[in-house]
Amino acid sequence: MTSTPLILASGNAGKLREFHQLLAPLGLDVRPQAEYDVPEVEETGLTFVENALLKAREASRVSGLPALADDSGLEVDALNGAPGIYSARFAGEPKSDERNNARLLERLAEVPEGQRTGRYWCVLVYLRHAEDPVPLIVQRSWKGEILAHPRGEGGFGYDPLFWLPEQGMSVAELSSAEKNRLSHRGRALQALVEALGQGPGAR
Ligand SMILES: O=c1nc[nH]c2c1ncn2[C@H]1C[C@H](O)[C@@H](COP(=O)(O)OP(=O)(O)OP(=O)(O)O)O1
Ligand SMILES: [Mg+2]
């Protein structure tokens, strides 16, 4: 394969797996940022967009290659949008999915079924180079409800607690192919690939 590698500006193994499943079949040469010794940046932005930009820019700067970053999280209505951009650090440092999930259950302990609605957000930023003045940005959400007990073994992060009423399953009970087809990340990535496929002259 002769295409320029694309750096995935993430250290999250769950995200990297999903990106790989979605992008490798397209013949894109995608590499995790760890291969280029990209350090983890501080996510100081106040929006998913700003944080994704910070991550993509650093990965592109260090590697000298185009970069794709994902900043994502869970917005829960009964918590006024928390944990939101703080989803990864909801239970403090070091980041832990298990402690984040426990914290979420604790915060929702008094909230009855029917009022436990929320959504995942995924913002993707693609930069052609570190100083790209025209980042390609795509955002998608995925609606669901927060369970009172975890279900399923698949996915990562909050997936065992994220219930899909239409599917009658938690995200952790979906196959990876089904998650990729339905998810905030899968749909954002599909839209991004379509935008890129129109070529640099198209935008
Ligand atoms: O499909 C998902 N299924 C379950 N949980 C998810 C999903 N998508 C995002 N999430 C949660 C995980 C983490 O708590 C936060 C992302 O935080 P976020 O800063 O974007 O990622 P991260 O720090 O884990 O890795 P990195 O910044 O290197 O990409 O939202
Ligand atoms: Mg992060």
Image (spheres, rainbow, N blue to C red):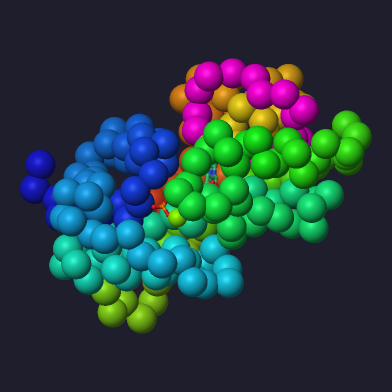
Q: Main secondary structure of the magenta part?
A: loop
Q: Is residue 200 visible?
A: no
- 83 left or right of 174 in image: right
Quarter occupied by residue 52: bottom left
> Residue 187: where, in percent of width, then height?
53, 44
The mark tally for this picture is 0
**Magenta segment:** 142-156
Where 173 falls versus 155 (above or below)?
above
- 11 left or right of 111 in image: left
Quarter occupied by residue 117: top right
Is residue 20 in the magenta section? Answer: no
> Residue 27: where, in percent of width, then height?
22, 39
Please name whichever residue, 4 or 53, is drawn nearer the observer in this view of the structure: 53
Where on the image, by quarter, is ligand 2?
Answer: bottom left
Q: Could you tell me which residue is drawn at 83 percent across and 49 percent down?
A: 78
Please name whichever residue, 142 or 79, is drawn nearer the observer in this view of the structure: 79
Where 109 falls versus 151 (above or below)?
below
Where 149 falls versus 186 (above or below)?
above
Q: Could you tell me which residue is drawn at 67 percent across and 30 percent down?
A: 161
Q: Could you tell me which residue is drawn at 52 percent across and 72 percent down?
A: 45
Q: Could you tell me which residue is drawn at 8 percent across and 48 percent down?
A: 2
Q: If the image is split into quadrants, where does the N terminus sit?
A: top left
> Residue 65: where, in percent of width, then height?
19, 63
